[in-house]
C-alpha cells in the first residue's frame, strides 16, 4: 500500500509573519491580530482534517517551540538556557494555545545535545534523541530514544 503523507514544515513562521505584517500596517491592536490569527489557524486545521479524511492520508504539521520568558540576555543577545526542560512547561509552541485543541496526536522531539554542532560528531558519536507521544486519541503516552545515522533512524536500546 502506498504511504499517503502530507508534511508541513513549518506553518508557524508564515502565519506569524503575515499577521505581524497585517497588524503593523493597519495599526490594529495585537488582541485583534491574535484573534484573527487563531481563527485562521482553526480554519487551516479544519481544511487539513478534511484533506486527511477525503484522501485517507496522514497530516504532520511541524510546530516550532520557543523559550517563554526564561531566556537569558547577555551582552544584548539572547542566549540559550540549557537548564530548561520542555516537561517543565518553560517552552511555548509557536502556533499558540488555539492550535493545541486542533491536533489529535502530539509528538515531542527532543535532544540532549545540539545536533548541529560539528564538534559533537567526533569519533562517530551521534547523540541520541527522544520522541514522546504526549497526546493521542489512540495510544497511551510512550517514549523512544533514537539516533539519526547515515543509515537512517535507529532505535537506541
Image (cartoon, rainbow, N blue to C red):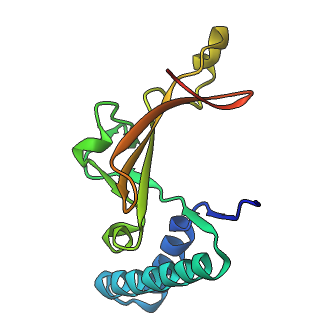
Q: Residue furthest top?
A: 123
Q: How many marks?
A: 0
On the question of residue 71 being in view, the answer is no
In this image, 46 relative to 1: left or right? Answer: left
Which one is nearer the viewer's eye here, 55 or 44?
A: 55
On the question of residue 106 being in view, the answer is yes
Residue at the (36%, 90%) spot, across then down? 28
In this image, 123 relative to 135: left or right? Answer: right
Residue 6: horizontal and vertical position, in percent?
A: 66, 66
Residue 119: horizontal and vertical position, in percent?
A: 60, 17
Q: Residue furthest front?
A: 1
Picture quadrant where residue 137 is located: bottom left
Q: Is residue 81 above or below residue 63?
A: above
Residue at the (35%, 56%) spot, across then down? 135
Residue 103: horizontal and vertical position, in percent?
A: 42, 68
In this image, 132 relative to 45: left or right? Answer: left
Residue 11: horizontal and vertical position, in percent?
A: 55, 68
Q: Is residue 149 above or below residue 17?
A: above
Q: Is residue 151 above or below residue 30?
A: above
Residue at the (53%, 72%) spot, across then down? 17
Q: Is residue 92 above or below residue 103?
A: above
Residue at the (25%, 51%) spot, across then down? 69
Picture quadrant where residue 35 is located: bottom left
Picture quadrant where residue 136 is located: bottom left
Which one is nearer the viewer's eye here, 91 or 138?
A: 138
Q: Residue furthest right?
A: 2
Which one is nearer the viewer's eye here, 70 or 77?
A: 70
Amino acid at each position: 500500500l502506498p504511504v499517503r503523507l502530507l508534511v508541513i514544515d513549518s506553518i508557524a513562521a508564515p502565519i506569524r509573519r503575515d499577521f505581524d505584517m497585517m497588524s503593523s500596517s493597519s495599526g490594529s491592536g495585537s488582541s485583534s491580530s491574535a484573534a484573527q490569527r487563531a481563527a485562521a489557524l482553526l480554519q487551516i486545521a479544519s481544511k487539513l482534517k478534511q484533506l486527511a479524511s477525503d484522501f485517507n492520508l496522514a497530516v504532520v504539521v511541524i510546530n516550532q517551540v520557543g523559550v517563554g520568558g526564561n531566556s537569558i540576555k547577555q551582552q544584548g543577545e539572547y542566549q540559550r538556557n540549557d537548564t530548561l526542560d520542555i516537561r517543565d512547561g518553560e517552552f511555548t509552541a509557536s502556533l499558540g494555545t488555539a492550535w493545541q485543541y486542533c491536533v489529535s496526536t502530539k509528538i515531542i522531539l527532543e535532544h540532549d545535545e545540539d545536533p548541529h554542532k560539528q564538534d559533537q560528531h567526533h569519533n562517530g558519536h551521534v547523540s541520541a534523541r527522544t520522541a514522546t507521544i504526549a497526546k493521542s486519541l489512540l495510544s497511551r503516552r510512550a517514549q523512544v530514544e533514537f539516533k539519526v545515522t547515515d543509515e537512517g533512524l535507529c532505535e537506541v536500546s
